[in-house]
Amino acid sequence: DTAVSQTPKYLVTQMGNDKSIKCEQNLGHDTMYWYKQDSKKFLKIMFSYNNKELIINETVPNRFSPKSPDKAHLNLHINSLELGDSAVYFCASSRDRPNTEAFFGQGTRLTVV
Amino acid sequence: GDSVTQMEGPVTLSEEAFLTINCTYTATGYPSLFWYVQYPGEGLQLLLKATKADDKGSNKGFEATYRKETTSFHLEKGSVQVSDSAVYFCALRPRMDSSYKLIFGSGTRLLVRP
């Protein structure tokens, strides 16, 4: 059983398009996240949701809109894609305890052409 | 704000060599500390963690000790294998942060040659 699964794994699209990435976790965690990994492997938090409520929005352009229909799902919709959006996007989840780890999905490699 | 600093890579070693990857942190209070590993084309996997001062995390021959005095959490392995080639991330989770987010270092690529 995959703990955190995200789809698709690869996404190639043209500038200006709108696309979505889906994420689901079956760990019963209350908190879910989206991270962006750039070409230099640097990981930066984008959003954090706790019990379906937005906790963090780290100065992400409003073209990025997360949606959490329930505690097990956190989707990421991106409008008007730009070349600079090309990156690997990771979904993660964790318990809402500071001494516990986060579990990551396999990542979605987004390429905007 | 809270941050993690890792040694820059790549680190290139021969098989069976000793590995150290340095990690230091800046944080308010006493965060939990983690090492994650990312193999090529894959997501991040937890390698080990330590949640309080002087704790030692260990897994698969890797170890790291939470040093409050030096605000460090250096990763070590006595004898690396080719299969250890990956990118290693040090991370912290602030104790008094309702977002529970992980803050990552910049990652250190390890290449182990046969």
Image (cartoon, grey):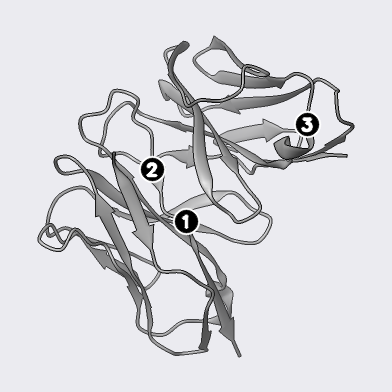
**Left or right: B82 with respect to A99?**
right
Task: Give me the residue at 65% from left, 22% from top.
Answer: A76
Callout 3 amino acid: Glu
Image coordinates for residue A51, horizontal then vertical, percent: 42, 13
The chain to which mark 2 is attached is: B
> Which residue is the site of mark 2?
B103
| Real-space Cα separation, disc 1 to disc 2, in angstroms | 10 Å
| Real-space Cα separation, disc 3 to disc 1, in angstroms | 24 Å
A55 or B57, which lies in front? A55
Image coordinates for residue B30, horizontal then vertical, percent: 16, 44
In terms of image quadrants, where is residue B60?
bottom left
Image coordinates for residue A96, horizontal then vertical, percent: 32, 26
Mark 3 touching mark 1, by CB under 8 A?
no
The chain to which mark 1 is attached is: B
Q: Quadrant of the C terminus of chain A?
A: top right
Crowd around label 1: few <14 · some 14–19 · many ≥20 (10 Å): many
Q: Quadrant of the N terminus of chain A?
A: top right
> Which residue is the site of mark 1?
B106
Disc 3 versus disc 1: nearer the observer: 3
**Left or right: B69 with respect to B36?**
left
- Report whether mark 3 lies on the same chain as mark 1: no
In terms of image quadrants, where is residue B58?
bottom left
Callout 1 amino acid: Ser
> Which residue is the site of mark 3?
A82
Image coordinates for residue A93, horizontal then vertical, percent: 47, 31
Compared with B86, B3 (above or below) is: above
Q: Secondary structure at mark 1?
A: loop
Compared with B81, B71 (above or below) is: above
